[in-house]
Image (tube, helix red, strand yellow):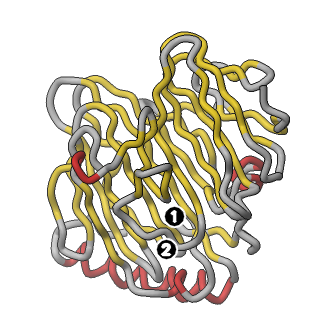
Amino acid sequence: MTTRKIIARAGGHQHGPITRVVSPSDHIGELIKPFVFLDYFNHEGNFDGFGMHPHSGIATLTYMIEGEVNYIDTSGKTGIVPAGGLEWMRAGGGAWHGGGGRGNGLKRGFQLWVSLPPGMEDGPAESFYASPKEVKRDGNVQALLGSYGTAKSPFETPAPMNYFHVQLKDGERWHYEPPKGHRVSWVYPYKGALKAGEMIANEELAVFDSSENAIDLEAVGDTAFMFGSAVPHPHALVLGHYSVHTNTQSLQASEHRIRKIGNRLAQEGKLRAG
């Protein structure tokens, strides 16, 4: 099995139908940056988890496993993210977006935040959407960001990183060779459990030690998990409420821009003032 040691674990914190697995203000967010935030949502019926809210300095990826959610953003785009689909929003110097699900049925998925490097953290906001057909698979791995074998994400990443959805049958093994420089690696099984020399429980995030060594995982029961690897983000995390920047000046400028956008949205009746 793997020579990579598990150096940290996190079960997250429950907020209604959402489990906040990783936050940029906690120890895990520092360990696995550029991955600085991970929410897992799993809810039957109406889902209002993503009301209109701002971001800056990061990119967000929303991935639907089951059910669908609607989306809206300040680029003027609106629509539906169906099961297997993706929303990728690079907030840059400031943007607002939101979404939720109505009606019966299970809504299950993840929202990931990725920190942006200097320059890009102050750039224009852009949003992109991918249908399930555009999310490519190689064997039991879907490449949501980056690439795996013949599968490549429909989006360009701000720095070298991979983010996968992987499904294994009971007892099946998965071997991962990180690309050069990918010293950050983590895994989160949301269905079943994993062995990586030691057990990784269901709905537990495990962080591997910083190296480029291979990782071997074995499914305990039919298992599905999220997996990330990346070149480490070499900058400090300077935090706002919905923002992550590399320096205070960039954060302050973006928060000013966010307030201006918020005031406009309130005047248009799309957001409650204050």
Q: State how many labels appear.
A: 2
Please say if 26 is above or below 241.
above
Say which residue appears at 34% left-offset and 27% top-offset: 43
**Which is nearer the eye, 204 or 154?**
154
Please say if 193 is above or below 247.
above
Label 2 vs label 1, nearer the camera: 2
Figure quadrant of residue 98 = bottom left
Q: Which mark is residue 165?
A: none
Q: Is residue 193 left or right of residue 106?
A: right
The N terminus, quarter of image = top right
Q: Which mark is residue 56?
A: 2
Please say if 252 is above or below 35.
below
Gap between marks 2 and 1 measured at Cα: 7 Å
Q: Which residue is mark 1?
A: 242
Label 1 near label 2: C-beta < 8 Å?
yes
| Callout 2 secondary element | loop
- Please state which amino acid type lies under the numbered disc 2: Ser
Say which residue appears at 53% left-offset and 11% top-offset: 170
The C terminus, quarter of image = bottom left
Q: Which x, y percent locates residue 165?
A: 46, 39
Q: Is residue 81 left or right of residue 201?
A: left
Figure quadrant of residue 53 = bottom left
- Please state which amino acid type lies under the numbered disc 1: Tyr
Say which residue appears at 49% left-offset and 44% top-offset: 164
- How packed mark 1 is, by other alpha carbons closer than 10 Å (few <14, some 14-19, many 20 or more), is few
